[in-house]
Amino acid sequence: MKQSPSRVDVPLQLWVVLARAFDAVERHSRASIARFELGTTEFGVLEVLYHKGELPVCDVQRRILVESSSTTYVVDKLVKRGLVRRRHSGSDRRVVLLALTPAGRRLIRRIFPPHAHAMRRAVAALPPSDQARAVRLLRALGLGAAKRLEAKEPV
């Protein structure tokens, strides 16, 4: 039996709708990236280094939202393919920096524009003004949820 509109649990409904929307858009992303024979994490590493330049491994990991063991595995693969290089920081040898090689820069420069186009198409169900509003709302949602975790509020 369907609940009446006054009894809908909006926070849970938001969570379900958000998860389904993310899944649908993520499927577009995976399909786009697969055209270039890369996994999503590999693409993420290349993309963040392309847009941010040389970064410590821990910063790359934080930006692409994957576990450290996965990052190491993916970076190893990218290094073997000659797309990424590692070097120790001159100021702190414990810090490992990652950067694109010339081949990695050529690859991501070639494949990022069609991927960006695919992602624009994936979110085109919303007009640009609603896309901008969604960005603001989802950023506020994410920051608020993160603050609650940091404050160790009960779950």
Image (cartoon, rainbow, N blue to C red):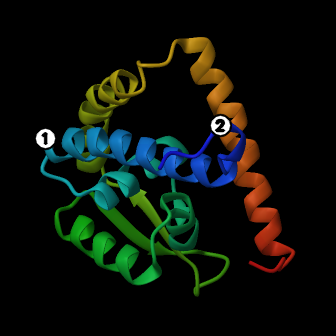
Compared with residue 55, is residue 111 higher up or lower down, i.e. above or below?
above
Front-most of residues 16 and 143:
16
Callout in the foreground (1, 2): 2
- Residue at 83%, 80% (x, y): give it: 152
How many marks overall?
Answer: 2
Q: Quadrant of residue 111?
A: top left
Quick check: 47 left or right of 97?
left
Q: Residues within 10 Å of mark 1 (few under 14, many from 20)?
A: few
- Residue at 65%, 37% (x, y): give it: 5
Quick check: 70 left or right of 114?
right
Quick check: 31 left or right of 7?
left
Front-most of residues 71 and 146:
146
Sequence-first tag of 1 and 2: 2
Tell me the CA gap for discs 1 and 2. 43 Å
Front-most of residues 142 and 11:
11
Q: Quadrant of the C terminus?
A: bottom right
Front-most of residues 52 and 115:
115
Q: Position of residue 154 (x, y in %)?
A: 81, 80
Three-letter amino acid code at the position of disc 1: Arg
Helix, strand or loop at label 1? It is: loop
Q: Position of residue 153 (x, y in %)?
A: 84, 77
Three-letter amino acid code at the position of disc 2: Pro
Identify the residue position indicated by label 2 in the image: 5
Quick check: 93 left or right of 149?
left
Compared with residue 139, is residue 98 higher up or lower down, i.e. above or below?
below
- Residue farthest to the front? 1
Helix, strand or loop at label 2? It is: helix
Mark number displayed over residue 35: 1
Q: Quadrant of residue 69?
A: bottom left
Q: Are marks 1 and 2 in contact (CB under 8 Å)?
A: no
Q: Position of residue 102 (x, y in %)?
A: 29, 47
